[in-house]
Amino acid sequence: WCSDRQPELSIGRFSGIIRRHGAGEASLRMSAVGNMIIESTTAHKKMERFARAARQAIDVLRATGSPNVTIVHHNDADGICSGSVLWSALEREGYRVTGIGVEKLYTQTLELSFSKVTEPLFFSDIGGGAVTEIEKLNRPGRPVFIIDHHHTSGIAGHHINDVYNLTCELYGISGEDE
């Protein structure tokens, strides 16, 4: 149960309300089974916009017909975790996945990745800062998906040379604060 006192959460029953107040107020409600439902707020609208872009990217991936994908992920804790979650989701959809952990996207690393990898390519927790270089290196017809929370350039929903930048900042979601 929850009252109007904030924040309050009944861990034993996985129920409650968590609220954060301020600009872009967001409220999350956890159901009895632990599912989170984002109530209709500014944050919800941002997430809906991001989700539409993600669905478009999924449609693009499926349209390739490729059974293989490669994930280039940052080799720190959040990069390994996000790469693993992405890997699991792609495997669940039937893709054969290859993963490459990197410390930084040096020009040589990018050139090697684009010369050796022929299937759709994902950058997870890395790549947002190298969008322009990735767009230049990609060959037409091979989709590249950047899923990141670091600073980036570009316009939400706009892609160049089959590079889909799903960096959350483009959708008004701070990778540092939310």
Image (cartoon, grey):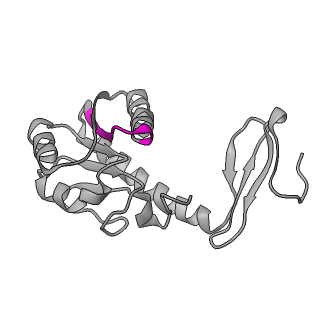
Q: Tell me the quarter of the image containing the N terminus.
A: top right
* Magenta-tinted stretch: 69-78
In screen coordinates, is 177 left or right of 68? right
Residue at position x 25%, y 46% in the image: 104
Nearer the observer, 108 or 122: 108
* Viewer-nearest residue: 65 or 126: 126
Picture coordinates of residue 165 (x, y %)?
32, 57
Q: Nearer the viewer, residue 100 or 135?
A: 100
- In the picture provided, is 64 more to the left or to the right than 116? right
Residue 80 position, x and y percent, is 40, 35
Point out residue 19 in the picture as x, y percentages from the top left corner. Answer: 75, 59
Q: In the rendered structure, does residue 77 fall within the stretch colored magenta? A: yes
Q: Residue at x 61, y 62 (%)?
A: 44
Q: Main secondary structure of the magenta part?
A: strand
Residue at image coords 48%, 55%: 51
Residue toward you, 162 or 130: 130
